[in-house]
């Protein structure tokens, strides 16, 4: 997605593929003319997003009628057409591999700008004989059956009530002749309306979830907790009894948090091919970094801090993802040390019936040398514990000593 100053450009625009050695321009936040190849090799944004064009001999380039470069999507825009405080007219370009996705994105952006007082002008895209006007801000039309609404929600709404609720959510409604069908026109930015159930949800929201009368299911069944949940509940009781507070953290993390900050060499992991943000790019392979991130955010709180998590990690195995359930705990404060965290780990293992041994671990990059140990069960290493290395603490922004343990419990 690119935003450039339209007054510095002269339509029509051309979107084409050029060789990496052609189409030189001055990229954003730079003062030197660069070819696409040079941008990918030396410019910070080129290095960050260059992997998208890896293996290709050409790259996309948008230019105006006079040949002025607008952008090299999806990497960077040109410095000469960047937006400034005096910009009055903005040219928006959105590129991608899914036509539907980029049209939906353009609708959302344009509607958001229009709400802030902007005047939206359409652009005609020519693809040979095909002409396409964008953005298409016509309403999204759907049909909704009143009977279906009441069946899903367990309600007895009249058509007028459903109409009122949907109008409160921004939809336009026309009642059918028998009032059993509603013609719904949704705003163009409501690209989340994929199915009639999405419209039914928009009926439930203004009515209020708490205003639906609770009722028992219309069938008889007997449920019982999973064995794994009973085990986890037992572990929680033990950890809370020792003074720990349970935390929950996302299973998706980043290379920096999983590998770089805790000083761990990068090893095989499950990465997201097209991550939405740089902070959520892969599935974590261990829980300790998640606990350290939480300690870093709470460094202003009273010490010592004692937290634990029972959560999953994922590792690649035989071409598939294998989920592993783990117990991880951290102690942060002036008295956090190897012996303290080892005593907590021993107590947790004893109380939960997990028979394990501790084996000296002379070297582990995340821990202080000589103050770490492996947790072994039946000859196999299933965990680790130790005092976190000062450099790792500094990388996370933690100002007090910390000691951690992590055990595989699945």
Image (cartoon, rainbow, N blue to C red):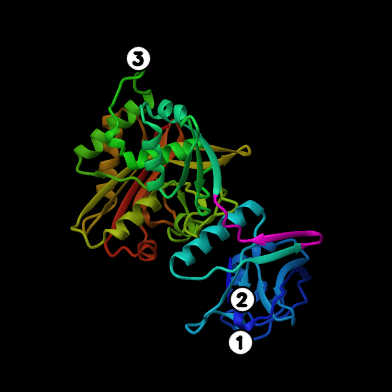
Q: Residue furthest bottom?
A: 31
Residue 387: image quadrant is: bottom left
Mark 3 and mark 2 in contact (Cβ < 8 Å)?
A: no
**The N terminus: image quadrant:** bottom right
Q: Which mark is first along the chain, 1 or 3?
A: 1
Q: Residue furthest front?
A: 177
Farthest residue, direction top: 220
Q: Position of residue 202 (x, y in %)?
A: 41, 41
Which residue matches tag 3? 222
Q: Residue furthest right?
A: 128
Q: In the displayed structure, would residue 155 be above or below residue 188?
A: above
User: What residue is shown at x 59% (from left), y 54% (from top)?
Assistant: 274
Question: What is the x, y in percent for residue 283?
Answer: 50, 47
Mark 2 — residue? Answer: 43
Q: Secondary structure at mark 2?
A: loop
In the rendered structure, which segment of residues is drawn in magenta? Answer: 127-139
Give x and y (percent) for residue 99: 66, 54
Question: Crowding near pointer 3: few (<14 within 10 Å), some, many (20+)?
Answer: few
Residue 355 figure quarter: top left
Q: Nearer the viewer, residue 303 or 41?
A: 41
**Viewed as shown, does residue 183 lie left or right of 77?**
left
């Amino acid at each position: 997605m690119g935003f450039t100053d339209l007054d510095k450009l002269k339509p029509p625009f051309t979107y084409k593929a050029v060789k990496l050695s052609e189409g030189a321009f001055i990229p954003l936040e730079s003062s030197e003319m660069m070819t696409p190849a040079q941008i990918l090799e030396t410019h910070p944004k080129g290095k960050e997003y260059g992997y998208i064009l890896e293996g290709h001999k050409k790259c996309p380039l948008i230019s105006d009628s006079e040949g002025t470069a607008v952008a090299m999507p999806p990497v960077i825009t040109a410095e000469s057409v960047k937006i400034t405080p005096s910009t009055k007219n903005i040219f928006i370009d959105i590129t991608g591999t899914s036509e539907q996705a980029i049209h939906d994105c353009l609708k959302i952006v344009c509607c958001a700008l229009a709400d802030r007082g902007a005047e939206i002008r359409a652009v005609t895209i020519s693809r040979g004989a095909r002409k396409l006007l964008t953005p298409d801000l016509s309403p999204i039309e759907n049909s909704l059956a009143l009977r279906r609404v009441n069946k899903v929600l367990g309600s007895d709404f009249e058509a007028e009530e459903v109409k009122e609720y949907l109008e409160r959510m921004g939809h336009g409604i026309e009642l059918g002749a028998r009032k059993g069908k509603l013609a719904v026109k949704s705003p163009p930015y409501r690209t989340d309306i994929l199915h009639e159930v999405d419209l039914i949800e928009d009926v439930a929201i203004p009515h209020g979830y708490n205003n639906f009368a609770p009722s028992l299911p219309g069938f008889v069944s007997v449920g019982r907790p999973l064995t794994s949940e009973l085990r986890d509940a037992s572990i929680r009781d033990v950890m809370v009894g020792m003074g720990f507070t349970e935390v929950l953290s996302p299973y998706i993390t980043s290379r920096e948090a999983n590998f770089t900050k805790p000083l761990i060499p990068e090893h095989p992991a499950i990465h997201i091919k097209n991550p939405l943000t740089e902070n959520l790019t892969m599935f974590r392979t261990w829980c300790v970094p998640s606990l350290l991130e939480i300690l870093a955010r709470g460094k202003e709180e009273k010490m010592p801090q004692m937290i634990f998590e029972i959560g999953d990690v994922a590792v690649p195995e035989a071409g598939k993802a294998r989920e592993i359930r783990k117990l991880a705990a951290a102690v942060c404060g002036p008295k956090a040390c190897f012996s303290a965290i080892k005593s907590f780990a021993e107590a947790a293992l004893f109380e939960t019936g997990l028979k394990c041994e501790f084996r000296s671990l002379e070297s582990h990059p995340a821990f202080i040398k000589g103050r770490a140990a492996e947790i072994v069960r039946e000859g196999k290493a299933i965990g680790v514990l130790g005092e976190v290395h000062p450099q790792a603490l500094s990388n996370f922004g933690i100002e007090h000593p910390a000691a951690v343990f992590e055990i595989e419990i699945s």
